[in-house]
Image: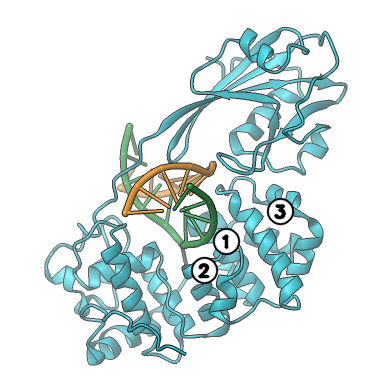
Chain colours: A cyan, B orange, C green
Amino acid sequence: MPPAPPSPAPPPPFSDPSVLHGGIVEPLLEWFEDQGRDLPWRRVRSPWRTMVSEFMLQQTQVARVEERFEAFLERFPTPSAMVDAGEDAVLAAWEGLGYYRRARFLHGSAKAVVDEHGGEVPSDPAMLLALPGVGRYTAGAIASIAFDRPAPIVDGNVARVVARIGGLDHQADDPALIDAAWAASTALVEATDRPGTLNEAVMELGATVCTPASPRCDRCPIRSSCLGRGQGIEGEIPRPKSRPVRTVVHIHLVIVRRGEEILLERRPSGGVWGGLWQPIGVESETELESRVVGERLGSWMGTLDPLARVRRLLTHREVHLHLFEAGAPVGDPELGSERETGWFTRDRASELGCAKPVRTLLDRFAWTEARDDPFLLG
DNA sequence: AAGCCGGGGCT
DNA sequence: AGCCCAGGCTT
């Protein structure tokens, strides 16, 4: 078996054993024991709860997850229960959290846990890494936090803390900084017999003290070891990453009624709001006239009347939603086979996952007759 | 290496 | 109006 490649040396002060222990590890552990927040996934700990929390927390702030975690766990108390509930149920419970691929990956990981690991979340980072939606960070987080394995982790918090403690002047997404953060995190977990707690402590510090803007150094337990503060640049690093250009997309949605039901379709699994449900629709780079929307859908639902328009800014999309209402259908529905469709009552539709603005439009317009309200129009 | 994928709170 | 967030996958 070939020797493992030598891990790059951590930057100072993480490379200095005496500073690492007395100036960083011990103060951090003590601070976290005393000042760490009481969060749902910490109050009652289990590997499954840790795994769910880590999926939810990917690119999502603690406050958003905190308010929904217990209800989610009550709905899916075990991997087996999540598999039995099905992917649509997970998508529906995920509604509003964004990055919906995570919900499908979590369901897929639950299935892998049941099928390949006897229903128990594995403790080995390599096994975790093989699960869908589990990358280097999440594998290390579950292994260390749930099983106290000495696995390093690097998320936005860890990278920021390392940049400041090490006085590393980089852009937030600079690979040189990320590499340095992995080396530093490796040094940290190897310097303690409580790697899970230490990993949580570093992230907690980044979330509550070593915050992106105006860090609260007066409350920092390791400020005496902070090279960035010594240089007076702690508030300037890491430098913000260049922001992406936002491209415009127009989504034209048509409400077609049949008694108490409306016609919904599932969006493709890739792309914006992948796998979520919406009224049947047409997408384009520019706004389409109602006549064109009707033609592209097959001209079977009669005249389309505009109901509402809303604009939504995503990270790299500017989404314009145009909602129409079908008049008297002049023929039977002509539905392409490329998308899954179905007729749904309000109750049944509530069991599907919908994007937040789509749900808002549905609740406002799909099942009510109060359509002369100027709300959202214009 | 770069692009893609949401939504909300804070400044 | 920007900013950021307990990232991972695809190309």
Mark pair 3, 2: CA separation: 19 Å
As displayed, is residue A105 above or below residue A245?
below
Question: Mark 1 and mark 2 in contact (Cβ < 8 Å)?
Answer: yes
In the image, what residue occupies the spot 42% across and 81% down?
A198
Mark pair 1, 3: CA separation: 15 Å
Disc sitting over residue A286 in the figure: none
Q: Residues within 10 Å of mark 2 (few under 14, many from 20)?
A: many
Q: Which residue is mark 1?
A: A133
Q: Chain of mark 2?
A: A
In the image, what residue occupies the spot 74% across and 42% down?
A352
Disc sitting over residue A138 in the figure: 2
Question: Mark 2 and mark 3 in contact (Cβ < 8 Å)?
Answer: no
Of badges 1 and 3, the one in the foreground is: 1
Q: Residues within 10 Å of mark 3 (few under 14, many from 20)?
A: many
Q: From the viewer's side, name the closer residue of A319 and A227.
A: A319
Disc sitting over residue A90 in the figure: 3
In the image, what residue occupies the spot 25% across and 91% down?
A17
Of badges 2 and 1, the one in the foreground is: 1
As displayed, is residue A368 above or below residue A194?
above
For this orientation, the residue located farthest to the right is A259
Left or right placement of residue A48 versus residue A59 in this view: right
